Image (cartoon, coloured by chain):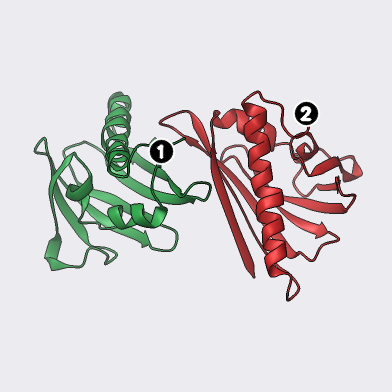
Chain colours: A green, B red
Amino acid sequence: MARVYISSVINGRSDRVWARVRDFNGLPSWHPGIAESRIENGEPADKIGCVRDFRLRNGDRIREKLLGLSDFDLFCTYSILESPMGVENYVATLRLTPITDGDRTFAEWTAEFDCAPEREAELVASIGNGVFQGGFDALKRQFGGESR
Amino acid sequence: MIRIVRSTVIDAPTDQVWAVLRDFNGHDRWHPAVARSAIERGLSADQLGCVRRFFLRDGSELRERLLTLSDLEQTFSYCLLDTPVPLFNYVAHVRLAPVTDGDRTFWDWRCSFSTRKGEEIEMTRMVGEDIYDAGFAAVRARLAGVSGPEGGA
């Protein structure tokens, strides 16, 4: 099983960052890699079990299912149902934790999945450096430069 | 039940911060409030269930038991057994996590406890500021190579 772990510090309060990322249908509004998204069957985006069908800027389509969402612990867990990536048993979690020292947010994005062994390094890099770090970089820009 | 959560970012790799915090008997070498500490019954400081008996600089004596220690998750938990201040059912959790886009460390320190009516504000201040915030500052200074409040180890 391959594992990806990417974490970052966002220069905004965790409730504000959470308001940005909580919407399971909202990736196009903050993630630069996502072009469009919709929730299937007209369900609410915070209904556990709903499915988002979204398209990347490179044209790839991905369907993902919402497995867990917590406004208390600030995390969102989802699995991939369909993608051109060649991954199986893919489960990912985006989690925010307040940094009380300075009203900042610690953001962690993890994924576990199975894939062909010869593709693991490439997939870990593209998911971690591309999708996850790309999302965090966008949030860091949106919430202002980080002050150490 | 009172809950306290304090967290910060230390400008050092997680392994360096963990090397300081992992030693359950080592807080007298980095925390400015702790004067001396010893593990009871000659146990190793990473033996789950071991008890540290320690003295603060003001002379008060405390005992705490190690409840959880994970080198994989870089977490540990402990509870207070004896203390001269009104902290009851005090359980604390420490978690480190790498900030991968900068080789820094996220450090989360939280606890829950109850106290006597009327002492809530003072106990909350003491734990949050005198123990947690002061601990953050001491480790930050130590890993920055600057002499901490103890004048360096």
Secondary structure state at the residue bearing disc 1: strand
Residue at left 14%, top 61%? A40
Q: Are marks 2 and 1 on the same chain?
A: no
| Chain bearing mark 1 | A
The location of residue A94, given as percent across then percent down, is 36, 48
Q: Quadrant of residue A107?
A: top left
Measure the C-alpha gap from mark 2 to mark 1: 32 Å
- The picture places residue A42, in percent across and down from the top left corner, at 13, 67
Residue at (47%, 35%) from the top-left corner?
A148
Q: Which mark is residue A8?
A: 1
Specify whether B68 is left or right of A88.
right
The amino acid on which the numbered mark 2 sits, given as a three-letter code, is Gly
**Quadrant location, the N terminus of chain A:** top left
Query: SS class of the residue under badge 2?
Result: loop
Note whether B102 is above or below A93 in the view shown.
above
**What residue lies at 43% left-to-right and 32% top-to-bottom?**
B100
Q: Is residue A88 above or below residue A14?
A: above
The chain holding disc 2 is B
Q: Residues within 10 Å of mark 1 (few under 14, many from 20)?
A: many
* Residue A132 in sight from this viewpoint: yes
Give the x, y percent position of residue B136: 63, 41
Which tag is nearer the camera, tag 2 or tag 1? 2
Q: Amino acid at mark 1?
A: Ser
Residue at x-position 53% and y-position 31%: B11
Quarter-of-image position of residue A72: bottom left
Number of marks in the image? 2
The residue that mark 2 highlights is B151
Whether residue A120 is situated above or below residue A21 in the rendered picture:
above
Q: Please tell me which residue lies in front, B146 or A73.
A: B146
| Residue A1 in sight from this viewpoint | no
